Image: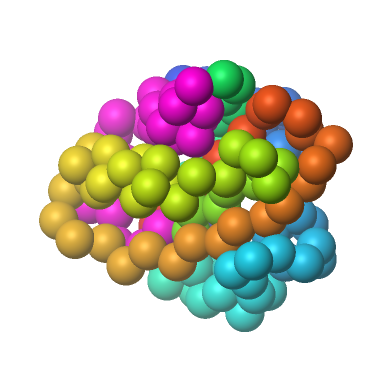
Amino acid sequence: MYFLKNDDGWNRDCIFNAIRSIVECVCLPGLVEVKTSDLIDLFRTGRRVSFSYGRGVGDKAILNATNTAISKVSSRLPKVNYIIYNVTGNEKNMIFFEIQESVNELLSWCNGSPNILFGIRLNNRLEDAVKVDIWMA
């Protein structure tokens, strides 16, 4: 398993956020659930696994957070077959049209047509911020 952030290899900050992402994805209630078995299945693919995250605020926060996460992923990834995409934000900034727009942006970055599983979490403590976590294999 590899966690990449700007091709730096093992990066402590990225590993910390990857572990925190797993806890948020599978342990906290959400509108759309990502289950522990979903992450286990991702790791069982036998493929290289990459994690990335991004934050956005204000107008188009979800799209900006997604683009930030995409920019942190290694450009040397082979074809991506599986993606877990999780969006965390408050009730006011969860705009489903923008989530769809962000997923389309992610798909345009990928080679081929990966299977995407997405989760949506509400966290009113984020105020205007939105957090996007992306797991790929």
Farthest residue in the left direction?
Answer: 112
Taking depth in this image into account, of 9 and 111 the one nearest to the observer is: 111
Q: Position of residue 28 (x, y in %)?
A: 80, 63
Q: Tell me, what colour scheme is on the image? A: rainbow
Q: Position of residue 92 (x, y in %)?
A: 65, 40
Taking depth in this image into account, of 63 and 38 the one nearest to the observer is: 63
Taking depth in this image into account, of 124 and 137 the one nearest to the observer is: 124
Farthest residue in the bottom direction?
Answer: 37
- Residue 13 left/right relative to 42: right
> Residue shown at 56%/74% (left/top)?
38
- Residue 67 left/right relative to 123: left
Farthest residue in the right direction?
Answer: 125
> Residue shown at 42%/71% (left/top)?
45
> Residue shown at 19%/61% (left/top)?
113
Residue 77 quadrant = top left
Q: Position of residue 87 (x, y in %)?
A: 57, 48
Q: Which residues are magenta?
A: 59-83
Specify whether residue 51 is in view. Answer: no
Q: Position of residue 62 (x, y in %)?
A: 49, 35
Residue 56 quadrant = top right
- Position of the C terminus, as image quadrant, is bottom left
Specify whether residue 12 is in view. Answer: yes
> Residue shown at 62%/79% (left/top)?
37
- Residue 65 left/right relative to 80: right
Q: Within the magenta stretch, is there residue 46?
A: no
Tally of numbered discs:
0
